[in-house]
Amino acid sequence: MEPGTDPADEPGTDPADETGYPQHWEADVLLRDGGAARIRPITPTDAERLVEFYEQVSEQSKYFRFFAPYPRLSDKDVRRFTHHDYVNRVGLAAVVRDRFIATVRYDRIDEDGRPSTTGTDAEVAFLVQDAHQGRGVASALLEHIAAVAQERGIRRFTAEVLPENRKMVKVFTDAGYTQHRSFADGVVHLEFDLEPTAASLAVMRGREHRAEARSVQRLLTPRSVAVVGVSRNPQSVGRGLLRSLAGFHGELYAVNRSAPDGTVLDGVPVHRSLLEIPGPVDLALVAVPEAAVPAVVADCGAHGVQGLVVVTAGYAETGPEGRDRQRALVRQARAAGMRVVGPNAFGLVSTDPERPLNASLAPVLPARGPFGVFCQSGAIGVALLEAAHRRGLGVSSFASVGNRADVSGNDMLQFWEEDAATEVVLMYMESFGNPRKFTRIARRLATSKPVVVVKGARHTGSLPPGHAVQPASSRLRDATVDALFRQAGVVRVETITDLFDTGELLAGQPLPAGDRVAVVGNSDSLGLLTYDACLGSGLRPRSPVDLTTAATGENFRIALGTALGDPAVDAVIAVAIPPIGVHGGGAPEPDDEPEVAAALLDAGERARELGKPLLLTHLALGGLAERLRAGRIPAFPAPERAVHALANAVHYAEWRRRSAEAERTARIPELEGIDEARARALVEGALGTRLAVAARTQPGGARFTLPEADAEALLGCYGIAVRPVLPAPDEESAVRAARRLGYPVALKATADHLRHRPDLGSVRLDLDGEEGLRRAHRELDALLGGAAQARLVVQQLAPRGVDTVIGAAVDPAVGAILSFGLAGAPAELLGDLAHRLVPATDRDVAALIREVRAAPLLFGWRGADPVDTGALEELLLRVSRLVDDLPEVASVDLEPVVVAPQGLAVLGAVVRIAPLPVRTDLGPRAMSSL
């Protein structure tokens, strides 16, 4: 559209028709270089900002935007670009420090390119300040303006770009949308559909990954650091932070607003204000009282600081008012382009020898090493660093982020994926900010680097005060967390000891090719304990090789070499105890331990060549463990710890192999007999019923249960047939129902308190005639307090088989989850259920039915006939497809599903639906606003 032509002058586009300001379009985003910016709608109050912004744009950029020299904006232009109806005309700006750095605008048009109020096309144009070009601002704006346009019913963007404006052409062509490109009259004409595609989502997530990784890198590698809140008290937090930074190689500054001129603390000159610091400051550590933080953040923003570590407490952990202060802190920092670690943070550590950083309160620092460590609790952070130091394990970087209001574990995972110095990620997590995103990032990272996690609050589900989470995330069931971790390849452990045991093995040894274990050593008893522990952990140990307590280093060398060279062995556990014998008063023979260590170190090199892990379990041989550190051979003072760590490595290695195979072969099969259009119409019709309207007024929201007939019709659209039931309130009704369905039949109670309770005698099977049916009806009528109260029904008898239960439920935090188990006690009493995220592939459902502990019952246990697992897997795929296609379906429960040697029968089904919110993970990139 040409400058000077105001769509407000067109019919039907009166600015007086403006809708309310769309607050939900505001978002904080990370740019390519890791800096933050705020995207928001442009309003009439932005006139001065727009003029100032335009004055900073080069003449060439103005020419590219308007196709002609256009040195300044007229008053009419300013009005045009700041007055929008937020429907047919929308303008967004990227803002840093309350100044525009880029703008984007769309105008709705009809098929002929004229202004319209009903068309589904829009013309889009950008303008980016030259100083901010190359930061990915236009790409971020495109994602957000496309989402806004879709919300307003626009399905396609058009753009005209001069051929020499290669940067803007690249913005459009790299976005991943389905597009058409043409060239006419010296202008490149682009058209692209706004529906997200696999390519556009991949592009968006790739940009998100790079931006978040870069933002963490900037925090960990500052060129200059200022500590704000340094006092004369050597015990104060600020002084502690300043002392921690003694080894920092860059410029170091201290700030105390009350310090006299010339004050020097710990060798660092003290300034009264951060604004008085003569040079740039990349990172500021904030240790002032909570009331003084906003002023400090304002000074940091004005000085161009890139990131903040806020150790100050008194925020969300104190209650609702504190949460409001926390949100204001993050909003203020992001508006100035800064990221925040904290508040209530313990700090950051990087052991990069070129740019070391200890921006934390850690009393003890580990050496340089392969572990990236993350936690939320400061107390746990101290414990993690102390444990690493005590065990001689080094870290590459460490982050303890407190309330996790901005920088989170997801950001750290993005960084560690790119960080060559990090080989294994260790995390202590108490809550999830965005579980769905965590799963996506962790799954990608785990294909190359192990991610080992201790998840706190496993049984209580409690949420530590101050943690910023989605409401649904605070109610995540532990079974759901397990499913997330298992599917993402995350190694879940119980304790901090397990965390480092498993991490040390994964960092120092090859991944095992299988679960076959050789046990070799000089103690029969310790070998047997190790053997038993292997069996208990699901490994397949060979009988221990006992070298006797008189074994020498050479004996160890030969035996270990034999075990490692055996193709039927995947891992070797060496067991060692001090030699039994006296030498001058009962002391162990002093030269044996070095010989054994040398044999183990030689064997470790051989094990690495063969790709087999070697580990040691020992008693009272601390010196031996120390010697083995040079060869990165983990040594454990208890066999259970060694075996547990090895079992975790075996399971992780198996996940890696399955994941790689799935990338090549896993698929979501095309299933016959699916009518998605009819199913969608049934759901939309159900949501408009009086029952749905009434459900919206009930506690818990709008989720409601479909009537049986509607549920069966919906399931039928996906090829899922539920065996019909007919009511039997009296004997005659039961007989008529049986005649209609055909004998043999079952008679059962369906009242809520009796449903799926055959243990209460509420079911009669194998009724092959009228006489037996009548007798069964009289018995249940007397036993259950009346046929009407028990809600007796007749159903055609299913073939004999194994009763199973299949479910799918939408968790607001993570999406739809598919579940499977055996009906009755295994699922209800023992919780023997397996879970997978939806959509499930053919390999997912095959693994799902084999994962439950009672799975042998499906495969011919004790001579029984195996059941039709192929039919079971297909049913699971159909349920997965249903809930994936129809986000309004809140849950599906099929129980029981009787799986016979040939075929299966679904005997009961409950379907619940709700007008669920739109998935946010398909929208444009945005930082959390919790």
Image (cartoon, helix red, strand yellow):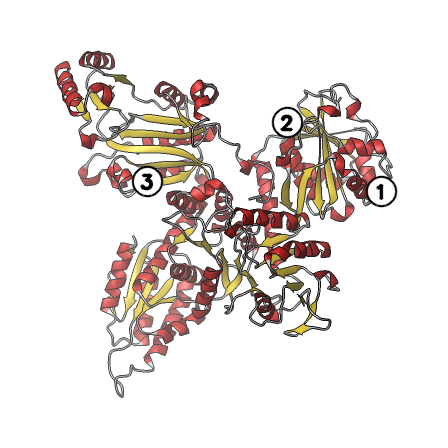
Give the residue type at disc 2: Arg
Residue 542 appears in the rendering: no
- Residue 476: percent from the left, percent from the top? 42, 43
Q: Residue 299 occupies which quadrant of the picture?
A: bottom right
Give the residue type at disc 1: Glu
Callout 2 crowding tier (Cα within 10 Å): few <14, some 14–19, many ≥20: some
According to the picture, the residue beneath numbered tag 2 turns out to be 152
Q: Residue 530 occupies which quadrant of the picture?
A: bottom left
Marking on residue 833? 3
Residue 805 appears in the rendering: yes
**Which residue appears at 77% of the width and 33% of the height?**
81
According to the picture, the residue beneath numbered tag 1 turns out to be 59
- Residue 888: percent from the left, percent from the top? 47, 28
Q: Earlier in the sequence, mark 2 or mark 3?
A: 2
Q: Is residue 582 left or right of residue 664?
A: left
- Residue 850: percent from the left, percent from the top? 32, 41
**Which residue appears at 60% of the width and 42% of the height?**
926
* Element carrying mark 2: loop
Give the residue type at disc 3: Leu
Callout 3 crowding tier (Cα within 10 Å): few <14, some 14–19, many ≥20: many
Q: Nearer the viewer, residue 641 or 858?
A: 641
Mark 3 vs mark 1, CA separation in Å: 65 Å
Q: Quadrant of the N terminus?
A: top right
Mark 2 vs mark 1, CA separation in Å: 33 Å
Q: Is residue 500 left or right of residue 515?
A: right
**In the image, which is nearer the foreground, mark 2 or mark 3?**
2
* Element carrying mark 3: strand
Q: Earlier in the sequence, mark 2 or mark 1?
A: 1
